[in-house]
Structure formats: C-alpha cells, structure tokens
Amino acid sequence: MASFSVMPNAHLHTILLRLLIALAVGTQMLGQATASPMKSVVPFVGCKSDGQVGPLKAPKGESKRVDAPPDVTRRLAYYEVEGGLGALAPRGWFCFGTYGSSGTNLYLTPQPIDPKLLFSPSWKGFSGPAIQFSIVYGSTSGRFGVARHIARVFPAHSEFVGNVISEGTAPASDFPRGPYPSDKLVYKGTESVEFETAANAEGLGTDSRLLPGPDPIRGANILVGADPDLLSLAVRLPAKDKDLVSTIIRQVDDQAATRKP
C-alpha cells in the first residue's frame, strides 16, 4: 500500500502567505502601470516661418517623447518653427509660423496654409479646425497683448496692466478686466489657466486667429519669466480628434515649465 505524508500546517500556512503577498505585489504593480501613461515617440516636423527679417527655413529636429499612450501618440506629431516654439497637433497637418518684435506664432491646420493670407489685412482668421500656439513678449511691443490677457485672467499680475496703461500709448478701455462671460476657466495657479471658449462665442480662444464657430475652443494661457512673457494656446479639432486636446495642452504645460527661471 502506498504511503502519503501530510505537510505540517505551519509550513502550508507559510507557503500560502508567500503566494498571497506575491499576488498582491503583482496586482499593485499592474495597477500602477495601467494608471501611468506610457511615454511614446512622435515624429518631428519642421515648419517654415516668415517675419521681421524675412523667411526662415523649417528647422530639423529629432522625434519627441510624449507622456501619452500609443493609441494617442500614433495620431500626433510635434511641429516646430525656427527658434524652438513647438506644439503637438494631429499627424499629417500643415504648419507655418510668423514672428516679429512682439513674439512668435505657430499655426497648424488640416489644409495647406497660404502665408500670404496670414499677412493679409483682409483675412479674418481660421473658421474651421486649427491650432495656434504663440509666445508674446512682455518686454517689447508684445506687452500690450500680454497686458490684455493679464487683465482678463491673471489678477495677481494686475500691476503689469497698470504700468502699460500709465505709458499713455493705449487707453484703459483696451484692457477689459475680468473673464469673458462664456469662458470656462480652470486655474493651475496664479500664472496658469486652462480654458474653454463656448461655440459661437468670443473668449480667450478667439483672442487669436481662430474665429468663433460651431465648435468650442480649448487651450491654455501661461505666464513665464519675470517680464512676464505669455504662452498662449488655442485648439479646435475635428470631432474625431477631440480626445487629443488634453495631451496637446499638457505638452504646452510641460514646455512652460522648462521656460520658467
């Protein structure tokens, strides 16, 4: 007759305890991996620009790592003009930049951009899907644009607005105080705000070359530096790409952090 040995209860309990601990640790690690976005690589696209000293060639650059899952990043590319101003946008879009003493602008749309339109006084702006990312300098002629945004959404920096008004170049009426009525604002601090401008309404989103339209405009305004300068992003995407907006805004937030002293 075969004989069987019985495992002592204490030994059995030890093995079971170790298995439970291993299972708990593995589950925790899996949960952390699921909760944290995976960094993926998106292609670099250089953009031509034109402005104060003439046309500039599209810069060359390397692919960029983005903190987002692959199903998002495979639909994005990183677009940049000479000088380093860059933003994410849907892959396959077209881009062009303008620059001058007041700042630099990067424009992105699903259709080719005619540079002549950007400089034409008769052109009103983009009526469809588009992205504008700008840096406006607070120490140059761009200070008027910076002051207008501060008056709207950055009350902690209202002294800057007062200083600009005291120059006597522009009247106080050019700098309305307080948010646009239809804008939804989410503050990230005294120098950073994300916004949504309602469809067919004026707001921070239309303080750009994006015209009011049937779709809302999302974006962010961020003050950087001591002057300060303003980073301004306005995004209106097609319905199929609206899930990309949060990643586009987050990348601008990260870029702002690298510019701060």
Image (tube, grey):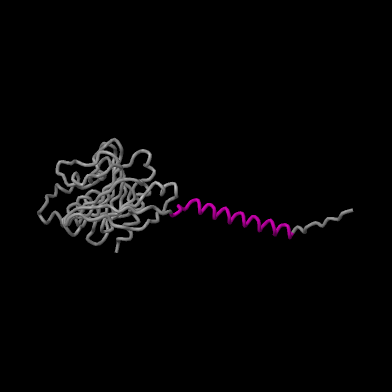
Residue 184 visible in the picture? no
Indicate left or right for 20 with 240 as reference: right
Q: Quadrant of residue 138?
A: bottom left
| Residue 83 drawn at (x, y percent) | 26, 59
User: So how many labels did they put on this image?
Assistant: 0
Q: Residue at x 42, y 51 (%)?
A: 68
| Residue 50 visible in the current orientation | yes
Residue at 12% across, 51% down: 170
The residue at the far left in this view is 168
Tell which of 42 and 233 is nearer to you: 42
Image quadrant containing the C terminus: bottom left
Nearest to the observer: residue 34 or residue 107:
107
Picture quadrant of residue 28: bottom right
Residue 11: x, y in percent? 73, 60
Q: Position of residue 150 (x, y in %)?
A: 23, 52
Residue 36 forms part of the magenta stretch = yes
Pick the front one: 46 or 166? 46
Q: Residue at x 60, y 54 (%)?
A: 24
Magenta residues (range): 10-39
Q: Does 120 sit left or right of 241 as displayed?
A: left
